[in-house]
Amino acid sequence: MKDKFKFVIAGFGNIASTYISAIKKIDNADVVGVISRTGHENSTSNLKDKIEFEKSLKKLKTNFDAVIICTPNGLHHTLAIKAASMGKHVLTEKPIDISLRSIDKMIDICKKNNVKLGVAYQRRMNPDNIVMKKIISENKLGRIFAADLTVKNYRPDSYYYNAPYRGTWALNGGGPFMMQASHNIDLYLWFFGKPNKIVSDYDTFIHKIEVEDHGAALLRYKNGMIGTIIASTAAKPGFDPKLEIHSEAGTVVMENDIITLWAVEGIENPSQAKGKKVFSGASSAVVSDTSSHEAIIKDFIQAVKENREPVVSAEAARLTTDIILKIYKSKIK
C-alpha cells in the first residue's frame, strides 16, 4: 500500500472532528471526503478546500478505501451496508449498532464483499488495559469473585438539546449504558467474558429525555463471579470511570484505564501508564487527546493490509451491544 489510505467520514458531528484530527497525525492516511445529511460543511471543516463534501457515498467522485461512520447509533448499519456493497472497508463509531438484526446484516454483507468491519472501542488500545487483559487471560489473579464498574458521567441538558437523537431509543438505542458506558462495558466483557445472568434497574432522573440517565446492573458468571455496572449522565460533576477487581490473589483498581491501586500477592504492579492521562469523558463529550483513536485507525489500516481482523472485531462489538440490550431487558418490574 504505497499510497495513503483514503478515508471518507460519514456524519459530521462532534466525533467526526476527532477522527479528522487523528488522521492528520497519521502519515499513511488521509481524509478525502465527508458525507453529511445536510450536505453542508460545519465549523470543523477546515479541510474543505482539500476534501469533497456530498450527501451520499455514491455521489462522491473521489476514490477512497474505507468509510468511518460517525452518524447516530441507529444509522450505523445503513451506511455500513452501502459502503460494503461498494467494496469499501468500514470502521464505525461505537456501538456497532443498536439492534442485533442490524449488526448481523452489517457482518454478513462485509463478509460477502470481502471487506473489513472494525469498531472504535479505542480504550482497548490503552496500555494498562492491554496489561490487565493479559494478566486475567493468564489467570495470574487466581479466582476473580467480584468486578465492579462505575461510569458516572455528567451531561448538561444542552448535550441532549443540541443533538435530540441522543435522548431517544430509536436513534441512540438508550442512555449512558449504550452511549458513555459502552466503551467500558466492551472492556469489561473483553476482560471477563459473557455473564449468564443479568438483573438491572434504571430510570430518568434529571434530564427530559425518553432514555435512562442513571442505572445499575448486577451480573452473575458461571464461575461464580458477581459483577456490577453503574452507568450515568446524571452524576454531577462527572467522575472518571473506575473498575475494581477483587480476587483470591488480591485487589486491583483501575481509574480511567490506569492501574491506580495494585494489591496483588507475588506480582509487582505491571502498570505501563507512566503518568499518562487518558480522556475520560466524565463531564464532556469533546475529545482532546486523539492518541487512542490514532491507534485504532492505524490498526484498522494494518488489518486491511494484512487481511486480518481489526483489533476490535464486529463479533466482539456485537457482544457489547447484546449485553447492553440484555441490561435494558432485565429491568426489575
Image (tube, rainbow, N blue to C red):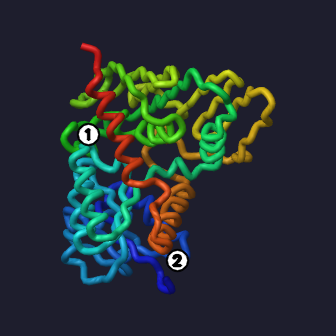
Which part of the image, by quadrant, shows the C terminus?
top left
The image shows residue 56 at horizontal and vertical percentages of 20, 70
Q: Is residue 207 above or below residue 269?
A: above
* Residue 161 in view here: no
**Identity of the residue drawn at 67% across and 21% down:** 248
**Identity of the residue drawn at 43% across and 45% down:** 285
Q: Residue furthest bottom?
A: 2
Q: Residue furthest top?
A: 333
Q: Amino acid at mark 1?
A: Gly
SS at circle 2: loop
**Identity of the residue drawn at 33% across and 19% down:** 201
Q: Earlier in the sequence, mark 1 or mark 2?
A: 2
Q: Which mark is residue 113?
A: none
For label 1, the residue is 173
* Residue 125 in view here: yes
For label 2, the residue is 28
Crowd around label 1: few <14 · some 14–19 · many ≥20 (10 Å)? many
The image shows residue 314 at horizontal and vertical percentages of 37, 53
Q: CA–CA distance between discs 1 and 2? A: 35 Å
The image shows residue 291 at horizontal and vertical percentages of 57, 58
Crowd around label 2: few <14 · some 14–19 · many ≥20 (10 Å)? some
Q: Is residue 291 above or below residue 151?
A: below
Q: Is residue 152 above or below residue 106?
A: above
Q: Amino acid at mark 2?
A: Asn
SS at circle 1: loop
